């Protein structure tokens, strides 16, 4: 388990926290593995009925730690990032995200696999894949236009335009926007309501809600993943990432 992923369980609710605030909770391979392990443990534990994913110190996550990511690039479905995405898609229990501050790249796309998303107005969402010479991931090429409409998804994915918590709420990506001091209480309220439901009925109902897009989602993950891996080797992506580090 990564030291930068903090996992705790109280009653029927497990909390998974990105905890690398000095790097804006940027995700390393070890952190991907830590979140995946936590989701699998919650999946297998009959006492756990809901998982809340959040970040430390007013930041959800700045997305991939690009230095770590380029040193350990994904090569296929067995890679850490793809294993996390599959764990999200296959998670049968309640999944809640509590988002404050930056939510970049996978910090936004993972929300498409959550049942409930609570955010603050100062949440800052951005999916800069094309900016980096890459392509969308997390089945966002399928799920985001389905959720918010093709035109808005095109602005957010093709032009990498950022948006705040209020815009995410208006678009239907977020359930509710709350004050920062109420963020976790609101997320746990969703988790507690879900945990109080008959567990078998909840799991079946969630499966039915997700079923119409399940096969298409898995197909999108595979197609995006293959293209993403290929793009990582492209001169365009190398130049874009070099430019990113030069600007920093």
Image (cartoon, helix red, strand yellow):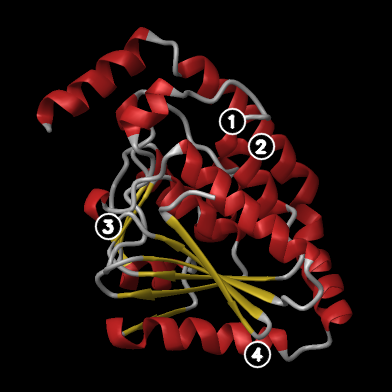
User: Rounded to the nearest whole Å, what is the CA distance between mark 1 and mark 2?
Assistant: 6 Å
Task: Select label 4 or label 1 by which is in front.
Answer: 4
SS assignment at label 2 = helix
Residue 247 percent location from the top left of the image: 11, 29
**For marks 3 and 2 on the same chain, the one whose residue lies earlier in the sequence:** 3
Outermost left residue? 247
| Upstream in sequence: badge 3 or badge 4 | 3
Per the image, the residue denoted by label 1 is 224
Q: Are marks 1 and 2 in contact (CB under 8 Å)?
A: yes
Q: Which mark is residue 193?
A: 4
In the rendered structure, the answer to whether residue 136 lies left or right of residue 25 reads right
- Quarter of the C terminus within the rendering: top left
Q: Which residue is mark 3?
A: 21
Q: Which mark is residue 192?
A: none
Residue lying at 39% horizontally and 23% vertically, measured from the top left: 70
**Residue 40, picture quadrant:** bottom right
Q: Earlier in the sequence, mark 4 or mark 1?
A: 4
Does the CB distance between marks 3 and 4 fall below 8 Å?
no
Indicate the secondary structure of the residue bearing disc 3.
helix
Which percent across, then down, holds residue 104?
35, 49
Nearest to the observer: residue 124 or residue 187: 187
Q: Residues within 10 Å of mark 1 (few under 14, many from 20)?
A: many
Label 2 sits on residue: 220
Are the two marked residues, 4 and 2, in contact with CB atoms closer than 8 angstroms? no
Label 3: how many Cα within 10 Å (few below 14, some 14–19, many 20+): some
Q: CA distance from mark 4 to mark 1?
A: 34 Å
Q: Nearer the viewer, mark 3 or mark 2?
A: 3
Does the CB distance between marks 4 and 1 fall below 8 Å? Answer: no
Q: CA distance from mark 3 to mark 4?
A: 30 Å
**Alpha carbons under labels 1 and 3: distance apart:** 29 Å
């Amino acid at each position: 388990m990564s030291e930068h992923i903090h996992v705790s369980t109280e009653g029927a609710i497990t909390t998974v926290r990105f905890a690398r605030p000095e790097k804006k909770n940027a995700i390393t391979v070890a952190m991907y593995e830590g979140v995946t392990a936590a989701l699998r443990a919650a999946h297998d534990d009959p006492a756990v009925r809901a998982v809340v994913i959040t970040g430390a110190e007013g930041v959800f996550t700045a997305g991939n730690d690009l230095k770590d990511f380029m040193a350990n690039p994904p090569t296929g479905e067995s890679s850490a990032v793809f294993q996390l995405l599959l764990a999200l898609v296959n998670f049968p229990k309640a999944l809640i995200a509590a988002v404050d501050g930056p939510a970049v790249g996978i910090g936004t796309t993972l929300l498409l696999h959550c049942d409930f998303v609570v955010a603050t107005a100062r949440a800052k969402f951005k999916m800069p894949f094309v900016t980096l010479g890459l392509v969308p991931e997390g089945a966002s090429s399928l799920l985001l236009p389905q959720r918010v409409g093709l035109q808005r998804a095109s602005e957010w994915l093709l032009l990498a335009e950022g948006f705040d918590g209020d815009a995410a709420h208006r678009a239907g990506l977020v359930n509710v926007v709350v004050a920062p001091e109420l963020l976790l209480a609101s997320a746990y309220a969703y988790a507690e309501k879900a945990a109080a439901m008959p567990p078998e009925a909840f799991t079946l109902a969630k499966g039915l809600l997700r079923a119409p897009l399940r096969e298409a989602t898995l197909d999108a993950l595979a197609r995006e993943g293959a293209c993403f891996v290929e793009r990582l080797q492209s001169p365009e992506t190398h130049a874009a990432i070099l430019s990113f580090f030069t600007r920093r």
